[in-house]
Amino acid sequence: MTSSIYIRFVTASGLTNLADGIATLAWAWLASLLTRDPLLIAVVPVALRLPWFICAIPAGIITDRVDRRLLILWMDAARGLAFAAVAIALWVALPLPVPPQSGVAQPLIFALILGAAAIVGVAEVFRDNAAQTMLPAIVPHAALERANGRLWSVELVGNALLGPALGAFLIALAVPLPFALNAAAYGLAVMLFLALSGPFKPAVTVEKNWRKELAVAVAFLRSKPLLMALAWITGFWNLLFEMVMIALILHVQENLSVGAQTYGLILAAGALGGILGGWTGERVIHALGPMRTAQWMLVLTAPAFVAIALAPGAVSLAIILAVFNYTGLVWNTVSVSYRQRMIPDALLGRVNSLYRLMAWGMMPVGLLLSGMVVKLTDGPLPRDVALMMPFGVGTLGAILLGVLGWRALGRWFPS
């Protein structure tokens, strides 16, 4: 697991996740600089997440046909170019006008942002699917929990610890800067993957007919009820998570009077919990067993949502997010390691894409639902209360998911 190939793979993933972390804050905060309409703000992350619903199946088929390393190279290059285009456009458009309560300032810039976000989202679908199918070819199956934990710890350092804080600092300094830095980060990742070598093209077991290829993957997934259960649980969890996190953008700005830099630090501090989960998740799984670990990490979601909504300030919110990120990372360690171990390499791209279609395709629904809840309640309720409503809806959904998910995991997980 300490081979040079694994180190290059992890380093490149760390760079791309640093860019993702910067973008996590930059996309949504930039949208809030162009409009104060919560539904329109949600449209930008929808453009990033909708490709998971549209492109997951094609990504899986292509991942099982081509050299996965080359696919990652092309996708990282596409993301770098998209971020560079946004940076240049924003630089030309400065200074940005005061955002209106309805509609958008700078409609052309907003349209460009949506287009670039869609390109980044499509590339992310192909890139992440290919990367997740590469890891079992790099490390032994027995070491997947440890390899995934270490990989995700590095990714979280970039994605959730350094990225949001750096993105907040840069966007407060100059709006185009986080997008320019992302373009550079993806360029470096491309250079690292150019130096990577290994057997990363899967053996073709069926003719190149997408219907037959997809049918084989569907049949395999349907034959594994635990994989199906993990997929739909993760999908509904992601819906609720995105609903809460996009609502948090306006909540911290208007209800907690938090600026971009402080919010970036909150997300960074919260990421420490996820990093700890990456390093200790293997021990938790060995102590409790995969089934009990997955069950307990799931049921802790509802109290976490309540605590996020009721946090009185930045410090308490950061602590709550740290605990929440810990549980999420340990859940991922269980579910992804099981998936990588159970799916044959020749099918890994297609089955993985079907799984992620269910698991990630729900994200845009959560984003839009969050914006609609605020939009519909802002007026009948005071705005500060309306901004809190997605947390309430998310908590009710998490309670139901926890009950149903506990039963499903108990039924299908091997004892």
Image (cartoon, rainbow, N blue to C red):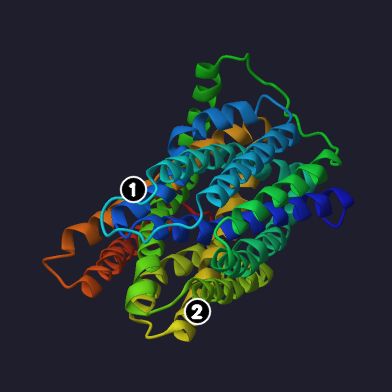
Residue 348 vs 368, above or below: the answer is above
Q: Position of residue 323 (x, y in %)?
A: 51, 76
Q: Vertically, is 382 above or below 145?
A: below
Q: Is residue 107 left or right of residue 136?
A: left
Residue drawn 51% across and 65% down?
328
Q: CA distance from mark 1 to mark 2?
A: 26 Å
State which tag comes first along the sequence, 1 or 2.
Answer: 2
- The residue tagged 2 is 318
Identify the image quadrant of residue 72. top right
The one nearer the camera, 43 or 233, is 43
Please count the marks in the image.
2
> Percent position (x, y) of residue 385?
22, 73
Q: Is residue 10 left or right of residue 32?
A: right
Label 1 close to label 2 by CB (< 8 Å): no
Give the residue type that dot 2 points to. Ala
Q: Is disc 1 placed on a helix, strand or loop?
A: helix
Density class for disc 2 (Cα within 10 Å; few <14, some 14-19, many ≥20) is many
